[in-house]
């Protein structure tokens, strides 16, 4: 009898473990399905990861991008070390604003181990001067509100990851999105890092905000977007959260020119015409500190 009782207990235990494994598989499949939906719409973005995922409004997607598995925001051994390069997919043959493609457009872009070490001082003021083929945009970076986001942007700008990249997604009245070293909405710097949120900064309150595209929590990388108007639909709980790490302090006319580039239907975002017919390149980004 003791043996039979033990057999019954073992059988029940085996059945319970089998049920737990099946439940775990179902949960994983549901998660993968959700992520896949976001990434398809984002193929942009591919891009915000594509930068816009499936969680946007009916007319427009939300910033997203395809990423590698997320990692802790704390720097690991070797963080910041270049691990290789990727080549940028060519943009449209015609360059917007009567410009020509910069020499860096055809150069491989660096990849790094990360997240990168913290090197900025959140108490200081950081400004990024972004020169594009449609004009110069001055960005006031919010080091106090998003120190990790600003630190990452400063690092990538100083290591010239952005030079020669192009705005692969332009959604009129919504956002312009760039920062992808691969140029197809699927690229990043080689790592991801933590999402930061600041309750005092919201898309509903102002236009011209600078934020990271992502494919879910803690998947920030290099892709960024600038809003062209107030966008309350990008604020939680409807979307996001997204790390807002700066704003346009000068050069809104350049942003408007980029936002008015002719576009065609984006195959990754239903109902959105955001695939540029003309290329707008980032020529350089210079960082100043005060």
Image (spheres, grey):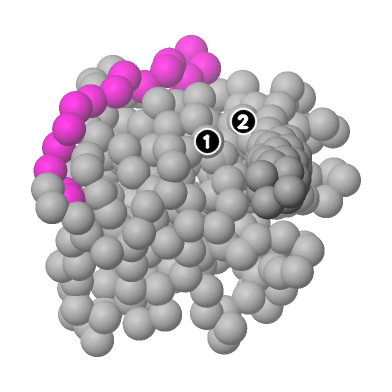
The spot of residue 103 in percent (x, y) is 24, 23
Please identify the quarter of the rendering in which residue 234 is found.
bottom right
Residue at horizontal 82 percent and vertical 31 percent from the top? 270
Relative depth, front residue between 39 and 151: 39
Magenta segment, which residues? 79-97
Q: Does the magenta stretch include residue 83?
A: yes
Residue 111 drawn above or below residue 27: above
The spot of residue 195 in percent (x, y) is 48, 63
Alpha carbons under labels 2 and 1: distance apart: 7 Å
Q: Does the image show residue 161?
A: yes
Query: Do labels 2 and 1 touch, CB within 8 Å?
Result: yes
Kindly state the secondary structure of the residue where label 1 is placed.
loop
Residue at horizontal 47 percent and vertical 38 percent from the top? 67
Nearer the camera: disc 2 or disc 1: 1
Relative depth, front residue between 145 and 124: 145
Relative depth, front residue between 202 and 254: 202
State left or right for residue 208 relative to residue 223.
right
Residue at horizontal 54 percent and vertical 49 percent from the top? 214
Quickly name the residue at label 1.
Answer: 66
Answer few, some or many: residues within 10 Å of disc 1's Cα (few below 14, many 20 plus, some between 14 and 19): many
Please identify the quarter of the rendering in which residue 128 is found.
bottom left
Quickly name the residue at label 2.
Answer: 43
Furthest residue toward right: 58
Kindly state the secondary structure of the residue where label 2 is placed.
helix
The spot of residue 131 in percent (x, y) is 33, 47
Most common SS among magenta residues: loop
């Amino acid at each position: 009898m003791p043996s039979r009782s033990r057999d019954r207990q073992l059988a029940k235990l085996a059945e319970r473990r089998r049920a737990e494994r099946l439940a775990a598989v179902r949960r994983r499949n549901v998660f993968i399905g959700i992520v896949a939906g976001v990434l398809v719409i984002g193929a942009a973005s591919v891009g915000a990861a594509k930068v816009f995922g499936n969680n946007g409004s009916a007319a427009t997607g939300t910033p997203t991008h395809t990423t590698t598995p997320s990692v802790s925001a704390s720097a690991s051994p070797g963080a910041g070390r270049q691990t290789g390069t990727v080549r940028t997919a060519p943009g449209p043959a015609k360059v917007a604003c009567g410009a020509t493609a910069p020499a860096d457009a055809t150069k491989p872009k660096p990849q790094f181990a990360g997240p990168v070490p913290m090197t900025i001082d959140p108490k200081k003021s950081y400004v990024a001067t972004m020169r594009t083929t449609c004009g110069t945009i001055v960005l006031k970076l919010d080091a106090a509100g998003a120190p990790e986001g600003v630190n990452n942007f400063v690092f990538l700008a100083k290591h010239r990851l952005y030079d020669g990249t192009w705005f692969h997604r332009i959604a009129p009245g919504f956002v312009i999105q760039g920062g992808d070293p691969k140029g197809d909405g699927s690229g990043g710097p080689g790592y991801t890092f933590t999402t930061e949120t600041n309750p005092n900064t919201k898309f509903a309150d102002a236009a011209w905000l600078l934020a990271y595209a992502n494919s879910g929590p803690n998947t920030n990388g290099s892709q960024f977007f600038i809003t062209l108007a107030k966008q309350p639909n990008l604020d939680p709980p409807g979307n996001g959260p997204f790390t807002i790490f700066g704003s346009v302090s000068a050069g809104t006319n350049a942003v408007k020119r980029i936002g008015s580039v002719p576009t065609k239907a984006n195959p990754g975002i239903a109902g959105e015409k955001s695939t540029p017919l003309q290329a707008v390149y980032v020529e350089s980004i210079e960082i100043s500190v005060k």
